[in-house]
Structure formats: C-alpha cells, structure tokens
Amino acid sequence: MITFFRRLRKTLIGEGNVRKYLLYAIGEILLVVIGILIALQVNNWNEERKMGSEEVRILNILKTDLESAVEEGEEFLRLDSISVEPLKMFLVEPDWVFRLNGEGKADSLITFSIFRVVTDVPVIQVREDIKNSGSSSSISSQEIRNKLVELDNKLELLEFRIADKMTVQQTRVDEVLFKYFNLQKMVKERVTNKPHEDEWSVDLFEVLADREATNILSLKLTISKSVFESRRQLQQTLKELIILIEQELHIL
C-alpha cells in the first residue's frame, strides 16, 4: 500500500499537475487522520472493555462481602435483642420480675443483661480496600456510589453509638453491677446451665428502689435501643446495596 502511494505521488509530481497533486495530498492527509481516529476508537473500546470487566469483578467481590456482612449483622441484632430484653422487662414490668423470681431465674438473667455489651459490627473489608485503592472510580453507577457513602455513614454512626454505650457501661453501669449483682453466680449458672442456690441471690426490688441505679440502667437501655436501631438501619442499607449491585451486574 505504501509503495502504491509513493508511485502515485511520483507520477503526479512528474506530470506537473498541481491541482491533482494537491487533491492527492489532501486525500492522503485525510486517510492518515481517519486511520488515527480508527486506532483511537479501537483503543477506547479496548479500555472500556477492560474497565467493564474490572467493574464486574469489583461488584461481584463487593456483593459477596456485603452478603456476609448481612449474615453477621443479623446475628449481632439477635444478640443485642437477647441481651437487652431482660433489662427492659426488669425496668418496666415488675410482675415479670415476680414470676422469674419464683422460678429462680431472674437475678442471673438480669445480671447478664446488665453485664453484656455487644460491640461487634459487620466487617466489610472489600469496601475499605476499594476506598484505599481508589477503585471506586471503576464503579459507573452513581446510585451505587451514593449508597456506598450512605453505608459508610451508617457504619460510622453505629460505631459511635457502640462507643458511647461502652463509655456509659464502664463509667456508670458497672458501678450498679458491682454493688447489687452477683457476677460469680451468673458465670457459674451460664457455664453449668443450672441454678446455683449456694450463691447469694440479688434483691431485685432493692435495685428498683434505688433511684440512681434505675436511672443509670434506664440510660443503658435507651442507648442500647439506639444501637439496635442503628444496626437495623445498617442491615437495610446493606440489603438495598446488594439489590443495586445485582441490577447493575445484570446490565453489564
């Protein structure tokens, strides 16, 4: 092809026809430009294909990580509910205390509820890797990127509320726990899964009569409810994000 154009150029120069030569020169330039544009377009297609496959890879890994986080989150919600419910019943349902006292279960159950603090949060390692590596730009869906920001905010709020709960636990709740409750009995009964009548029992009504103690325990209950709500909202965001990713993968 190059030899052909060289011969054609020599022929036109030899003829001395300026008009034909100019037309030829313009045509040759146009062909070069068209060739460059085609090469650029092919390169762009290749880059888009690479980016598309990278996006699919990232979304698939992220989806798997989010699904694991949902499973973890459901377990943490369950543990939070189990640990908070006896404290709630203790503070608002005295008849419940009477009934459990008759069964010999109330003091250890409530002791554990006051003692327990669930601090775990779902681990979403891929999300952190994406942020640290700058791979977020590979995700083309603005809706998914927005939901990832929402996820970060929900995680941050949950961690803040858990830290707040731990502070209250360590600075105030533990005072009530050590003053009124028998931790040794609670541990023995939870390990052996049977009552230990040889250990002294808690006078739960003495605790209820202590206004400062009930205020502190009510504060723990209030913060625990806020933690539970943050966990619930985080679960909802995780599930919404998984749906968005599934929809995007279907398109890609």
Image (cartoon, rainbow, N blue to C red):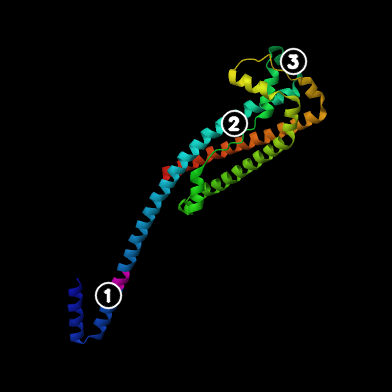
Marks 1/2: CA distance? 72 Å
Identify which residue is drawn at 78% across, 29% down. 213
**Amino acid, disc 2:** Leu
Marks 1/3: CA distance? 99 Å
**Amino acid, disc 1:** Glu
Residue 252 seen in the figure = no
The image shows residue 146 at horizontal and vertical percentages of 55, 48
Question: Is 4 placed above or below 89 here?
Answer: below
Res. 111 image quadrant:
top right
**Residue 151 shown in magenta:** no
In contact (CB < 8 Å): disc 1 and disc 3: no
Res. 210 image quadrant:
top right
Magenta segment main secondary structure = helix
Question: Is 111 placed above or below 27 here?
Answer: above
Q: Earlier in the sequence, mark 1 or mark 3?
A: 1
Q: Which segment did they paint magenta? A: 30-34
- Give the labeled residue for mark 1: 28
Question: Mark 1 falls on what kind of element?
Answer: helix
- Give the labeled residue for mark 2: 77
In contact (CB < 8 Å): disc 1 and disc 2: no
